Image (cartoon, rainbow, N blue to C red):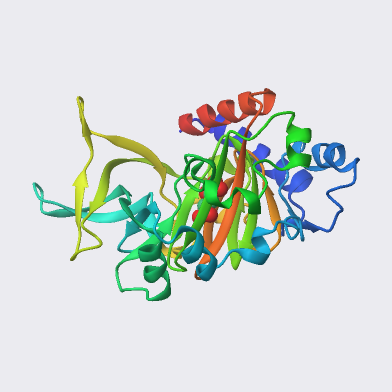
Amino acid sequence: MNIEITKSLNHFYKECKELLFTSCKAIEIEVDTADPDWPLNFYREYVSKNVPVVIKGGCKHFEATQKWDSTYFRSMLGEKDVTVAITPNGYADGLASWRNPETELDEEIFVLPEERIMKMDEFLNNIQNPKENVICYIQRQNSNLTEDFQELFNDIPLNIGWASKAFNKKPDAVNFWMGDERAVTSMHKDFYENIYCVIDGHKDFILIPPTDLPCINYKTYKMGQYEDVYQSGFNVKLCRDSNGIQHVPWIANDPLNEKCNLNSDFQKANVHRVRVSKGDCLYLPSMWFHHVQQSHGCIAVNYWYDMDFDVKFCYYKLLESLSNVK
Ligand SMILES: O=C(O)CCC(=O)C(=O)O
């Protein structure tokens, strides 16, 4: 451990806390997003400062908020094949305990969900009659709304006008999310500006600013994937490539599990908790760490705009290298 670097990081933490995080509640605002001044104000107040904000009622005018539910989806999409992430514990792309057959010891590894193609009707049956140890989530992040759900295009814009104006680009991806209340998206960050719109139900976000990176404990884990969750019990298969077992750096902290954060700097992180309800939009700035839970059957659409790889990104990378020296 380098004492000078630790001292500087502590000073950085203190300064950020004083200047940026006097309140740990994400800001909620009510604005007229059709106001021609809004894109510039949004950019000035939130994007350039890299600050999250909930825009109350920001998507309540989307027809989807009036139409989308299981009955509508059964009539529009019932026979359609959809890709569903399935896990036995709700953690798709998260850490789980795995028995290493060679050492016969339990290890924590990073596990991908089983991805199963099923009819939308079958997915909705799983949501309406949830089974123990079978947790379904439509959560593909390959712009699945534009790629897989053309039937819904009349109900929802394919870009958010004011956001496209502020960012001066169209979204790289528009993702559709629907799932079980037991599904959890574990803490991670994205190099995207995210406009997250809740169409039905609510989402609970736990947000941590990128300046708290030194409080976050990354470790490198073996990577596996669930198999046969849907049929009977399940397996975890290790993912391999030409170099052998694949590994991935992932966040070891879990805000829902106090035990794994004990004696760690994670307890110092500036945690913002925010509920995004039906008809609201969250601006989730690039590089913010986020952990997400939802109400049962919650439906959401999010728009990923590529971030500007500007000086903020360079400072983030510097902080990353300094935290690794520590
Ligand atoms: O809604 C979720 O479960 C996760 C959302 C997320 O991670 C994202 O939009 O980047």
Looking at the picture, tell me which residue is in the foreground, 146 or 220. Answer: 146
Give the residue furthest to the bottom: 129
- Residue 86 in the image: state x and y as whole percent: 33, 58
Look at the image and tell me in which quarter the N terminus lies: top left
- In this rendering, the count of numbered labels is 0
- Residue 244 in the image: state x and y as whole percent: 18, 30
| Residue 101 can be seen in this image | yes
- Residue 214 in the image: state x and y as whole percent: 54, 40
The residue positioned 67% from the left and 37% from the top of the image is 12
State left or right for residue 65 relative to residue 103: right
The residue positioned 15% from the left and 54% from the top of the image is 105
User: Residue 166 occupies which quadrant of the picture?
Assistant: top right
Looking at the picture, tell me which residue is in the foreground, 227 or 82. Answer: 82
**In the figure, 69 relative to 308: above or below?**
below
**In the figure, 60 relative to 207: above or below?**
below
- Residue 249 in the image: state x and y as whole percent: 38, 38
**In the figure, 322 relative to 302: above or below?**
above
| Residue 273 can be seen in this image | no
Looking at the picture, tell me which residue is in the foreground, 217 or 142. Answer: 142
**In the figure, 164 relative to 52: above or below?**
above
State left or right for residue 39 relative to residue 287: right
The residue positioned 49% from the left and 44% from the top of the image is 144
Looking at the picture, tell me which residue is in the foreground, 305 or 74. Answer: 74
State left or right for residue 99 relative to residue 289: left
The residue positioned 46% from the left and 58% from the top of the image is 77
Give the residue furthest to the left: 102
